[in-house]
Image: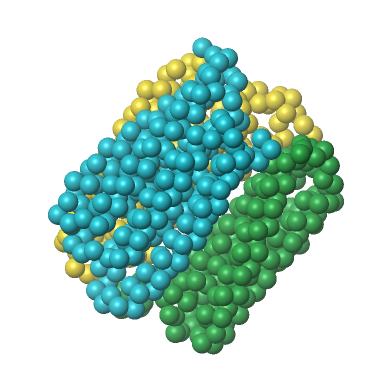
Chain colours: A yellow, B green, C cyan
Amino acid sequence: MIRILPREEKFSELFNQQATVLHEAARVLLDMMEGPCAEIAERANQIKALEHRGDTMTHDIITRLNRTFITPLDREDIHELSSRMDDVIDLIDATASRMMLFKITERRPAGIELARIIKRAAAEIVAAVPHITGERDKILEHCQELNRLEHEADTVCRSAIAQLFEEERDPITLIKWKEIFEVLEAAVDKAEDVSDVLETIVLKSA
Amino acid sequence: MIRILPREEKFSELFNQQATVLHEAARVLLDMMEGPCAEIAERANQIKALEHRGDTMTHDIITRLNRTFITPLDREDIHELSSRMDDVIDLIDATASRMMLFKITERRPAGIELARIIKRAAAEIVAAVPHITGERDKILEHCQELNRLEHEADTVCRSAIAQLFEEERDPITLIKWKEIFEVLEAAVDKAEDVSDVLETIVLKSA
Amino acid sequence: MIRILPREEKFSELFNQQATVLHEAARVLLDMMEGPCAEIAERANQIKALEHRGDTMTHDIITRLNRTFITPLDREDIHELSSRMDDVIDLIDATASRMMLFKITERRPAGIELARIIKRAAAEIVAAVPHITGERDKILEHCQELNRLEHEADTVCRSAIAQLFEEERDPITLIKWKEIFEVLEAAVDKAEDVSDVLETIVLKSA
């Protein structure tokens, strides 16, 4: 039942696929934030389907991991990398479902801006992950960019919430958007957690 | 100071006890959700007492673990299993204390429904845990059911929150119930985390 | 690239520095809670600067850790201790930035009380950490006090939130203070997580 091989490429390929699903979910989220409000429910359903695919992949990676005696990376790093990418997808889905549940009927610039940051963070992850089995040093520049994006999202979110408390007089609308901004920012935080795992993998191989 | 033995049964018995406390807390929570509002404070105190017992058990398991050289399971899995069961109990307690602090004076069907799901999840954990030292394959069917319950809770919670934003005009009441539904759902999420640890234990022994 | 030594004192000294930054942030937070509201923004900026210093330290510790073949403590404990201290600083910063973003213009006794508890918790951590490389048994009394402080913060926070729901009629003010009290309490919870790691370190060396 314990297999000595899966080839190194195997985990690597699974990670690439998971990163691609994450990027696709981020793309649909930005469409949702920029597009007509009438399409929110449809976009939320697309993201939910991607979240399910991501879940299956994470589960697949962890199952293989548990059955594998020798792995190309530290077991805990494989587990962490897959789980942290899954967290980003979950938070994209959490944002989308809130947009739908809260019956949002307006655009907010900070929502669009944060969704753009998430999409760029996803693109960095897609670019970084294939280097795990190759030139790991190339990963570090993507990690730097992910750190920068996290700080950018933090600034955007803080000023969006400050503005919300200053301008929004309807408490129920305030509750809705405060939560949407916070969940968007949490998604970027989780992308930085992905970056931390990637950095650990690079450092261990140094 | 380092003991080679504790017998395998020892950890297993501690886990059984912790699962029983969790199930008892879930039972009292459902009583609270279904019963008269006048009894909320009393039920919250019962749950708080159970939470303290659970805390002591987790602490006991981790202390033994740290002093034990050879353990029947991977150390990290023992630690995880105990900590995740503790998380479920903590969130049951968090719900109960909010019901009391918010001076809730009404029943909500979704609250009862979510508490029922938590109780069923607790029953699955009670049924799964004794198989750790026996036929581990029997654990998997309980994990499947815990996954199903998590999806059920998710659906119930989402529709409850959508309804809340649609119907509740008092923002303070909305804040209270939104938080209660979310904490109830978080408890079921944590029960699924217990399931993930159990699954890992099964897969490692395959 | 892998160094067999860093001397034991090295990690210990980094931990002492990190604990000192944490204590300093807690001190400024209490000043913010007690002092004039006009100074909130200035205090928040001081805390933000301390949070950045703490971040750099955590990063430094984890980088050294990953490059170090033999460490004086279990790698996972070093990682945990540094990350959990960082969490406390992050939550102090999260409180400070909310005080600023929400444009708070009033004092609340429970805010002051919780900030005092955080400062005392920070002082216990400062006192406990140097014993890691010495008489580890001396750590345990500080852990006991950290546990006690966590229970105290829990009681203060619960009664503050109950009072808020009873007395505050403006939902937006209620949202603001509910969140401030919760983040303050979360900071004390994280200080207890630091205590748990310290306790683990003591037990392993018993």
Is C152 placed left or right of B119 in the picture?
left
- Name above or below for residue C4 compared with residue A17: above
Q: Position of residue B17 (x, y in %)?
A: 74, 61
- Name above or below for residue C4 compared with residue C90: above
Residue B74 visible? The answer is yes
- Name above or below for residue A65 compared with residue A176: above
Is B69 placed left or right of A138 in the picture?
right
Looking at the image, which is closer to me, A103 or A85? A85
Residue at position x 62%, y 59% in the image: B55
Residue at position x 30%, y 52% in the image: C30
Residue C187 visible? The answer is no
Is C103 placed left or right of A8 in the picture?
left
Q: Position of residue C201 (x, y in %)?
A: 60, 38
Which quadrant would residue C178 be assigned to in this image?
Answer: bottom left
Q: In the picture, which quadrant includes the C terminus of chain C?
A: top right
Which quadrant would residue C49 be assigned to in this image?
Answer: top left
- Name above or below for residue B183 compared with residue A152: below
Residue at position x 65%, y 23% in the image: A7
Q: Position of residue A138 (x, y in %)?
A: 42, 19
Looking at the image, which is closer to me, B70 or A190? B70
Q: Position of residue C7 (x, y in %)?
A: 53, 19
Looking at the image, which is closer to me, B46 or A85? B46
